[in-house]
């Protein structure tokens, strides 16, 4: 039989590492890497700076959209993602 182990968690859902430091789980890291990839792709396609893209994505809710829909979005092509992000921003820009 396999021993059951529990991973200590913080109140915000991050795992505690061996030395009590907060660590992200694999899925959380995958989401962070995916959102970072999206920011970089959009930045390069539009000729914008990273900070400017971060403010735009944050202000319009695109950061949350990308994170919340990771399971579906990360399976799409780079070109499809760019078009999806542009369409989202066209519909949500203030």
Image (tube, rainbow, N blue to C red):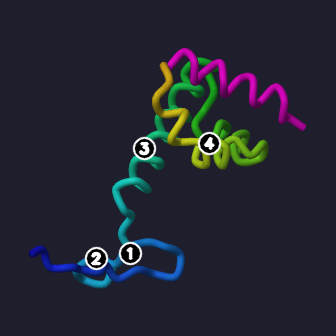
Nearest the viewer among 67 and 59 is 67
Element type at mark 3: helix
Quadrant of the frame with the C terminus: top right
58 shown above or below 80 = below
In the image, is 50 to the left or to the right of 16? right
Which of discs 4 and 2 lies nearer the camera? The answer is 2
Which image quadrant for residue 17? bottom left
Counting residues from the start of the chain, the first of labels 1 and 3 encountered is 1
In the drawing, what numbered circle is on residue 22? 1
User: Which residue is the site of mark 2?
Assistant: 17
Q: Nearer the viewer, residue 3 or 64?
A: 3
Structural crowding at the residue carrying mark 2, measured as other residues with C-alpha within 10 Å and reported as few (<14), some (14–19) or many (≥20): few
Magenta residue span? 78-94
Helix, strand or loop status at disc 4: helix
Task: Please give the label number shown on residue 33.
Answer: 3
Q: Earlier in the sequence, mark 2 or mark 3?
A: 2
């Amino acid at each position: 039989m396999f021993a059951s182990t529990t991973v200590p968690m913080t109140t915000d859902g991050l795992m505690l590492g061996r030395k009590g430091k907060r660590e992200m789980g694999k899925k959380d890291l995958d989401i962070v890497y995916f959102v970072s990839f999206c920011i970089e792709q959009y930045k390069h396609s539009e000729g914008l700076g990273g900070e400017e893209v971060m403010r735009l994505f944050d202000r319009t809710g695109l950061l949350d959209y990308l994170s919340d829909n990771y399971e579906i979005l990360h399976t799409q092509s780079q070109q499809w993602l760019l078009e999806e992000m542009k369409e989202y921003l066209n519909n949500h820009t203030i």
